[in-house]
Image: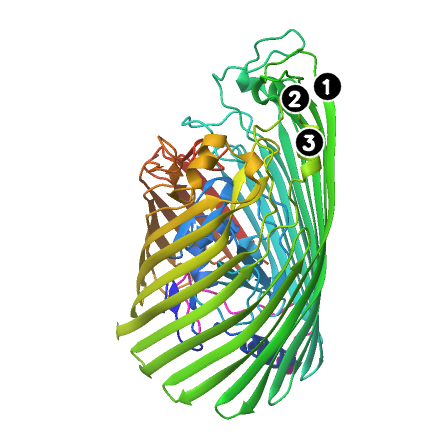
């Protein structure tokens, strides 16, 4: 059994943690046919075999693992991912994997979800996942475009999670989160639906060290539905639809002083500002899967629509920032993905596939600004309006082929080629070789080594030169006008590691990586609205090493991760107008740490189940997150790290067998039990917009009832 799996093996079964005793699965609503259930399971296995993580590092989060994270399956996805090695915590709920700023790819039942616009919230929730994995390292050829990490989510279904379940969670800072799931099967049709609503008073990280932020409420809803139909023993169709909608107050930082006078006013209390942001995402996927003795394939169509809107405080934004923008961005992506595998010979499995995606992005900005003279001094305190916008269309195309060659029973070579093309503001392409070797001489030792060439296109939403020209002569103008287009990142990725299993239940892993990057993509927040803008460094090097260990035996589960990483860049060479001239000039001749670099990252946890195996099982768990801090600017850009921090969390879950129900669970979670005040960002650093502090001590109580 494993708390967290580090897998470099060819294929690995998931063995769950010791968890609270579970009642046998209830009969699903409708007619439950055993033969249909077996077919669905076989098709699930066949789908997994189409896209294996051969030679890459795979960290698996089973339901039992997720249950030990604070809030369990009611927690945000980023909080689960932080328990994997080398995953770094940042503000706005962002995580960084192995020195990349973002560059994460999400897959639902094997289908790639297009990237959206949401910043403060993820369109997906942990509650959707039957199993979830983070795949990193030298990836096989089926993974393209977003390659820092693959968040592979196997969705729940009416077969895996039949019946109804309702959860109510409440906690500190006005936290309230009701949720539900309902699933079942009627003949050959499987159906599942889930949703949740969230309200709390810490929607975005607090810009001060205070216990309670000012003007930081959020209301969010998430929902997902899935229907699958078994046509015959070899064929299945599925439909997945989902969406999220979130409203955020932008938190206020008291005690600030205005930079500009507006309409005769020279002072405004910064704790009374009323800036707000809305984010929404809707997506859909339809898939046809076919399984035969030697051939498996899945063909899918997908779409995603995202919208982001920002309303400023009309006077406050103008007085403090010199611009009050009413902004709206939209993005619509639609595409087709196909993947297949062919057992060509006893020791050869050939895989191939493609992805085609069209994306349409719009940007509308109606801003109030102040006119200035040649020296940048306001000539009037009466605002004027400027209107800017953009309308861009982009295409992505990728195709790959690879061969899994089992040279010996203990030695497997997986090699392939991938070609990617992006056409948008710029047009670029690349042919990328991929190769992985896995050696497993016995059941106690596995080693892997791999090389992957990556191509990551620039995002379609970028600021155009017309928008820069429109702001000239105003308080919104940049001191620089240079705006070279953001280019695709090109990366050589080397990875090597091993895993040993010296004792029953004990696993120890080591993984090292080195990345040589041209036009590395980074992102920064440059003013309002709170939207990340991409830019490139001409060159970058990222390297690191990860140590993992876990022990699972009986009622005990323990894990620990330790990672070191160094990510540096040289010469910002795109979107230059966003930067301070001195900051930009320094990067032209000096290597600097990337702002999201954190040298040391660690996580650890332990869980013990009392009355193990009984209906009255009680699980207690604790975990810890540690980091040496993201970068800040003291003298030169990103020259220092923020303060080191460690956060300890506790959880308690009690199973209660109530007659006539499928079971009840009560859980209590304490996050940051020692009330550590720690700063994720201090407001300085390349592309860093504002200070942000981590969550202070917070308590949650949850009740889950299964029907």
Number of numbered markers: 3
Give percent across and percent down for residue 194: 63, 55
1 or 3: mark nearer the eye: 3
Please rate how many residues cluster around mark 2, counting C-alpha atoms within 10 Å: few if below 14, some from 14 to 19, many from 20: many
Marks 2 and 1 close (CB-CB < 8 Å): yes
- When the figure is inspected, residue 639 is found, relative to residue 194, above or below; the finding is above
Give percent across and percent down for residue 652: 38, 49
Residue 442 makes an appearance in the image: no
Label ID, residue 474? 2
Marks 3 and 2 close (CB-CB < 8 Å): no
Q: Secondary structure at mark 1?
A: strand
Label ID, residue 384? 1
Q: Secondary structure at mark 3?
A: helix
- When the figure is inspected, residue 614 is found, relative to residue 82, above or below; the finding is below
Q: Magenta span covers which residues?
A: 13-35
Structural distance between the alpha carbons of marks 2 and 1: 9 Å
Q: Secondary structure at mark 2?
A: loop
Q: Earlier in the sequence, mark 2 or mark 1?
A: 1
The residue at 62%/23% (across/down) is 274
Could you tell me which quadrant the C terminus lies in?
Answer: bottom right
2 or 1: mark nearer the eye: 2
Q: Residue furthest left?
A: 502
Please rate how many residues cluster around mark 1, counting C-alpha atoms within 10 Å: few if below 14, some from 14 to 19, many from 20: few
- When the figure is inspected, residue 619 is found, relative to residue 387, above or below; the finding is below
């Amino acid at each position: 059994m494993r708390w967290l799996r580090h897998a470099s093996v060819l294929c690995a079964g998931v063995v769950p943690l010791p968890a609270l005793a579970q009642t046998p699965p209830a009969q699903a609503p409708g007619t439950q046919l055993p033969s249909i259930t077996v077919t669905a399971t076989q098709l699930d296995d066949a789908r997994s075999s189409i896209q294996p993580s051969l030679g890459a590092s795979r960290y698996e989060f089973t339901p039992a693992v997720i249950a030990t994270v604070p809030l369990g399956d009611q927690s945000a996805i980023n909080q689960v991912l932080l328990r994997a090695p080398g995953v770094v915590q940042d503000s706005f709920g962002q995580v960084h994997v192995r020195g990349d700023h973002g560059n994460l790819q999400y897959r639902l039942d094997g289908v790639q979800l297009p990237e959206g616009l949401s910043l403060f919230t993820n369109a997906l929730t942990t509650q959707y996942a039957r199993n979830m994995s983070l795949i990193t390292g030298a990836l096989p050829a089926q993974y393209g475009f977003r390659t820092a990490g693959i968040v592979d989510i196997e969705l729940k279904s009416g077969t895996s999670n039949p019946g109804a379940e309702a959860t109510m969670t409440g906690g500190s800072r006005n936290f309230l989160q009701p949720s539900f799931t309902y699933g079942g099967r009627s003949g050959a049709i499987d159906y599942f639906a889930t949703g949740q609503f969230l309200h709390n008073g810490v929607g975005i990280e607090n810009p001060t060290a205070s216990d309670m932020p000012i003007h930081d409420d959020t209301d969010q809803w998430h929902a997902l539905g899935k229907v699958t139909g078994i046509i015959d023993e070899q064929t299945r169709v599925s439909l997945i639809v989902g969406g999220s909608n979130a409203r955020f107050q932008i938190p206020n930082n008291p005690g600030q002083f205005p930079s500009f006078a507006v309409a005769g006013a020279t002072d405004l209390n910064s704790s009374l500002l009323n800036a707000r942001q809305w984010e929404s995402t809707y997506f859909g996927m339809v898939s046809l899967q076919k399984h035969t003795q030697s051939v498996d394939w899945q063909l899918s169509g997908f779409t995603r629509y995202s919208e982001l809107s920002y309303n400023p405080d009309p006077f406050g934004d103008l007085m403090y920032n010199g611009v009050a923008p009413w902004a709206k961005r939209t993005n619509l992506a639609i595409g087709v993905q196909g993947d297949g595998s062919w057992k060509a010979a006893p020791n050869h499995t050939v895989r191939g596939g493609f992805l085609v995606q069209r994306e349409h992005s719009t940007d509308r900005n109606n801003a109030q600004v102040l006119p200035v003279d040649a020296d940048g001094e306001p000539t009037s305190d009466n605002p004027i309006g400027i209107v800017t916008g953009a309308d861009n269309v982009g295409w992505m195309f990728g195709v790959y082929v690879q061969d899994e060659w089992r040279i010996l029973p203990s030695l497997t070579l997986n090699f392939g080629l991938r070609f990617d093309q992006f056409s948008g503001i710029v047009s670029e392409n690349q042919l990328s070789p991929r190769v992985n070797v896995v050696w497993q001489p016995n059941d106690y030792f596995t080693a892997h080594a791999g090389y992957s060439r990556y191509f990551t296109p620039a995002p379609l939403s970028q600021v155009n030169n017309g928008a820069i020209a429109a702001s000239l002569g105003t308080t919104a103008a940049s001191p620089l006008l240079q705006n070279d287009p953001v280019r695709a990142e090109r990366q050589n990725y080397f990875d090597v590691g091993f895993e040993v299993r010296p004792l029953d239940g004990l696993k120890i892993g080591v993984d090292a990586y080195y990345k040589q990057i041209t036009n590395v993509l980074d992102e920064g927040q440059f003013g309002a609205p709170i939207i990340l803008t991409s830019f490139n460094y001409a060159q970058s090097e990222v390297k690191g090493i990860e140590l993992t260990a876990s022990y699972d035996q009986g009622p005990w589960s323990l894990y620990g991760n330790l990672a070191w990483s160094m990510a540096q860049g040289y010469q910002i060479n795109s979107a230059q107008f966003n930067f301070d001239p001195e900051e930009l000039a320094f990067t032209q001749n000096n290597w600097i740490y990337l702002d999201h670099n954190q040298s040391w990252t660690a996580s650890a946890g332990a869980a013990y189940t009392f009355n193990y195996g009984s209906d009255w099982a009680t699980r207690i768990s604790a975990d810890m997150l540690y980091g040496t801090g993201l970068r800040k600017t003291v003298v030169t850009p990103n020259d220092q790290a923020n303060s080191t921090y460690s956060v300890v969390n506790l959880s308690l879950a009690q199973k209660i067998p109530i007659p006539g129900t499928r079971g009840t669970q009560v859980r209590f979670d304490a996050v940051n039990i020692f009330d550590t005040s720690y700063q994720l960002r201090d407001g300085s650093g390349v592309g860093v917009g504002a200070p942000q502090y981590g969550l202070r001590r917070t308590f949650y109580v949850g009740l889950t009832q299964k029907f």
